[in-house]
Image (spheres, rainbow, N blue to C red):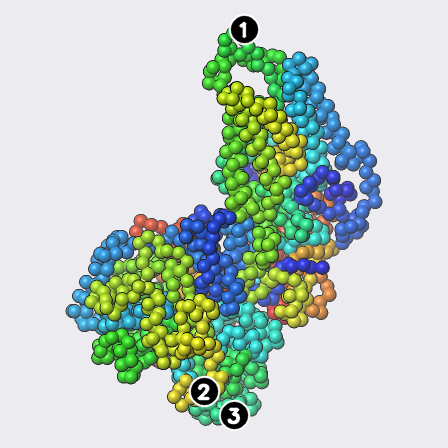
Amino acid sequence: MSGEQVPLDPSVAPLGTREFRDAGGLPAAAWRADQTEQTLVPTHCCFCGIQCGMYLRVDGRGKVFGVEPRNHDINRMRLCPKGINAYQQVNHPDRLTAPLLRRDRKQPFREVSWDEALEFTVEQINRIQREHGRDAFGMLGGASLFSEKTYLVGKFARVALKTRHVDYNGRLCMVSAAGANKLAFGIDRAANPFADILQTDCLLIVGANVGECFPVLTQYVWGARDRGATLIVVDPRQTAVARTADIHVALKSGTDSAFFNAVLHVIVEEGLTDEAFLAANTTGWAEVKAAVKEYPPSRAAEICGVPAEQVVEVARSFGRARRAMGWHARGIEHHTQGVENCLTVINLCTATGNLGRPGAGYGTLTGQGNGQGGREHGQKSDLLPGGRSINDPAHRRQIAAIWGIEESELPPAGTSMMEMVWQMQRQEIRGLIGVCNNPFVSLPNYAVVKDGYDKLEFHAQFDFFLSETAANAHVVFPVTTWAEDEGVMANAEARVVKHNKAQEPPEGVRTDTWVMCELARRLGAGSKFAFEGSRDVFDELRRASAGTVIDYYGITYDRLERTGGLVWPCPGLEHPGTPRLFEDGRSYHPDGKIHLQAVEWHPPADPYDDDFPMTLTTGRTVAHFLSGNQTRRLGALVEQTPRPWVEVHPSQGFRNGEPVRVVTRRGSAVLPALVTEAIRPDHVFVPYHWPYPVAANELTVDALDPRSKIPEYKVCAVRIERARAVDEVPAPPTPPGREAYPETQAPRTDPLPPTSSQGVGTGERG
Amino acid sequence: MAATPPPPGGSPDGSAGGSSAGDGPPPYRRGAVPAETRPDVTTSPAGRASMVAGAASVLLIAAILLGSRELRDFDSALVPYAVATVFLTFGVVYRYMMWISAPAARRMFREGWAAALSWENLKRSPTALPRMAATYLGFQKFLGARSHARWAAHQLIFWGCLSAAVITFPLTWGWFTFTAAGATGPGYEMRLWGVKLFGFDSGSFFGWALYHGLDLAAVMVIGGVGYFLWRRVRDRAATTGQRFGYDFLPLLALLTISVTGLLLTFSEMFLHGGGYEFLAILHMASVVLTLVYLPFGKFFHIVQRPAAVGMQLFKYTARRKGSDAEELRACRRCGQPIDTAAAVDNLRATMRDLRLGFDEWAEYCPRCKRVLRGTAYLSDVKRGFK
Amino acid sequence: MLGRTIFIDPGRCIGCQACVSACRECDSHRGKSMIHLDYTDEGRTVASLPTVCMHCEDPVAPCAEVCPAEAILITADGVVHEADPTRCIGCANCVNACPFGVPKIDLAAKLQMKCNLCYDRTSYGLAPMCATVCPTGALFYGTAEELQAERPGVDVSTEFVFGATTVSTGVAMVVPPERQAPVPGGLLNVIEVNGRSTPGNG
């Protein structure tokens, strides 16, 4: 700047000290806090499977305006950045407040009355089902819904739509763990509460970026270490928790089962197994032992790309610990052998007798708020409430009786979410209702997903912000946020917690329960859906789950409000719940044994070759949640992490911030390089919260695990090349005539990667 | 405040509680009393401040005597007000002298006035100073950036108080007189120092406004004070750490002055002077106490605020000298501009005055300071959990 | 002796920035985040460092000393407050004098702002927002005894060395038990950053 152009206010101050952005001006122009009437409504966070307790601050006019930490025993006042900003969704200017409708995708949406939107939807359902059969209409639910609503999704699909095609987005999330749990234990949940982590001597964290995806769980991890526990982290990236771990195994993505087979190999070799426990409580040990014999450390070292000594080191730490625990998440589940990967961890815990004791056990970290509860009560294609199988005639009869229908009326098992998209492409499914999901960002192989949804003759979506998927629909129903209705969720410990209603929904917004019941009424099934609200649904859910493994009968709203959460199975009103499983060594299989399963490693589905020599792995960042439809609108979170990036090792020769084209067999995206030694040299990482054209899921492969049907998000073949300019991040969709609240979106155009995978350092903002 | 004892009136509310520093070699620790400080009346800041303040008071008294034509125009009923202004002058000048005797303020004072009085600067940018004075002192644009409501309320108080002061101070000093132009009729003349300025008709709007100027000012002040009082009981940002003496007293003082002033007019117009005596005493007491209190509490910002213009002008003129590459100091680690080179040098000199032995750190931007410290922690204390 | 204060342990920090968002929720400065979160090992690891105001005790608050407007108040409890808005002239002296890099400035508003230890909360016995929500305990609020009861075998330090000067603070860092030396404030003779020579020493 030359001397002549100095502004009258010439002050300069260093970057990062000179601006106080009100984090996107939210809550819009109302950051002031007045010393007036305020109510604290106890509830839980709407985001991940930890389900931290929090208070929502409600002002004298009955509006949510802030958050206050709550000393709930899950989180003890701790919150992560998503949780702190969650309340800003409630009175956000981007909220949908009127149903949107268009008869043709070429037209723009127009706001219509509820009556018109519902009538049009019912008309289309009836037409499609009349012309193409009942199964031509499908339904997809979500695992961020309250359990009551997930129960309703399953019941609505089977009783009102009478279709077999119902599934939910937990299919992209926790089904591999669920499948492994059911196979081995006959019960699908974590075996130990989080509090057990504090008592363990050796904590094995596998494929879980605890620091970013479950930040509040870190206090348990550190608590264990304060008491002397050894921490082992298995992850291709050096995550925040891996950075300080005692052992960090940076294996190649997609080689987990080989690694754990080898660990078990060493444990067997060195006589660290608990033979008494195995003999008394398991079946299949001989087969497992034979299988792992083929996996000496040298073989694992070759497959996994880690030193053989590390295999031995992990085996000794885990095998020699008096109490050891294994926790895993999507890192080993998002694979074409996701179920088998989980089984290898179960084998490891079981073989060392680490089950059913304080500090000794096994768990899976559910990603979505109701990831656990969402899979329990019948929105999964093959399950009925209480985790009953839809293929079991006895289970079918029980549910038919509760629902007041003939067993023959109950449709058979449907297909999984990704398979349903393929069926849409083939026009086997022609109509769809989506509730609480955003497959345009969350499903793999975006091109296929877009094609499938485009082929739908009718598509309705329930949402409170217009998601990328909803923006492609014919009808969008504006529904409530979590703070505007009550209901329960089950966290990763299978602890059922109650969310309370903090404020009335905005004018024009209805609960998902109301919309489903109203649609059912108009479809002629009103008598089966005479629910006033969540309480009525929960009562039916309790009765429907009574006597099953997933027994909610003893859990009532009243008890939840008094206790702060109960862990199922809870069969009676006096029953204290079951925080820890297998205390007597018995599983939930009829024979009471743990069914160990032998696993053979196989390579990932997407083959490497000269064109695609490297590995792409995808995952989350701490400031955003899943498809980002919620978090990409909250100023503080956009500011923390404005855009996706590609994480590459310095040996790949890119400069930090340089545009890099990430190419797979399915697509490409140009993202800024975050050059860091914290990733394996043969891997690149892309976070998946953003939509096309910067979507990680343009790149990922739609190959499924044969058992759980989970897509292989965590590994595919890739190459990276130099590019000219990074792809721009699109604004979150809004209805016609409205703009995504601009102040929250200001940092989105930043072309640079964040400072670190957790976000942009505060010193580099404005 | 190196080499000097803390000034007695220097920080009545405890602000800027600086340390005195030792004069030995580093590390500099608190508690060592420097040997060379043997204050005497002429060289100690307090002594010098008292002398300058006394001189200023004497000057004011002389001006009152001259301006009121040897007290011929002086209204003896206003004596307490006039005496209060003398005390006010002493207090303000004393506080001002004490204030600028502290190293940071002294250096900023010098640089600010040097920039303001520099012939070079005047030639280069003649309009800078008046424009800055108008935006920072008159229209207080910076307050708008803090909050629009606070800006509006402060403007009401500011212009209200300013007009009240402009009207009343010369009156109490006997500088202004209003005399009837004739034996009868509405014609009046306004005189300054006995010299006729203009005549006006007491029935005209101008006459009305002049007569009721103080009432208008009072209404403005009450509006602004009302908002601030409301904010002080309601806004959690304002209530945090607020103190009665510092935050409420000034508002209550202004409110009392304005309300009693208005009541005087009310008494005169509608009550035929009922209660006038009592109200007059109350009004006078509140004004006198406020004036005497002014140098020591929140009101001292009125005297300090012009330093913002000095500071601004200092940085402005520094940047007008040459290119940013020369005139801006870049962080020695990351190259981001920190401030004008002159300001950083001024700060480093201030830090050396204060015996803060880490003035070299001022050449690094805050982020780099934190990163350097973080890096040192990682390499020198512990890398991770253990 | 240390009373109730914040203890910082960067070794536990996961860089999630919960503190940065939580700071905005503090009623005494809603919407404005005062805490800093830096990724101090950029390009190598995801290590991070949260920085709150250290509330310097000796020398008492350099920021207040270099303030030409007497705007920074230090209360008897040792809390160094943010600038008094009626006095602050926005000169940025405090921003550049603070060896820890704490104060921020709003140039348009001519106003400095910095961590005040959530005075609206701490003055009523509540923990500051950042330390309340910190998911990892990298920011801990309490007494040194409470800290050591939760974390056996840690020690704390309030001494920082900047060149030849030692600054002692009201906020403490967690250090290994055997450590006697003060915590380094950072080495200034930076020759290069990420392979590039630095402007000051190039």
Q: Residue at x 70, y 53 (%)?
A: C57
Q: Nearer the viewer, residue B379 or C52?
A: C52
Question: Considering the image in quadrants, where does the N terminus of chain B appear?
Answer: top right
Foreground pick, A68 / A697: A68
User: In the displayed structure, does residue A543 sit left or right of residue A64?
Assistant: left
Respond whether the residues carrying marks 2 and 1 are from the same subunit: no
Q: Which label number is shown at residue A276?
A: 3
Does A482 appear above or below B21?
below
Disc 1 chain ID: B
Instruction: Report helix, strand or loop for mark 2.
Output: loop
Q: Amino acid at mark 3?
A: Ala
The answer to which image quadrant residue A520 occupies is: bottom left
N-terminal of the pair, mark 3 or mark 2, is 3
Foreground tag (3 vs 1): 1
| Mark 1 secondary-structure assignment | loop
Residue A728 visible from this viewpoint: no
Please tell me the numbered disc located at residue A586: 2
Furthest-left residue in this view? A131
Q: Which residue is mark 1?
A: B183
Q: Residue at x 51, y 68 (%)?
A: A73
Using the image, name the chain to which the residue with label 3 belongs: A
Give the Cα distance between marks 2 and 1: 116 Å
**Amino acid type for the residue under numbered disc 2:** Arg
Coordinates of residue A1 in the picture (x, y in percent) = 54, 41
Residue C124 placement (x, y as % from top left) = 59, 54
- Residue B184 point in image, percent of width and height: 52, 7
Q: Picture quarter containing residue C140?
A: bottom right
Subunit of label 2: A
Can you see residue C33? yes
Confirm whether circles 3 and 2 share one chain.
yes
Q: Amino acid at mark 1?
A: Ala
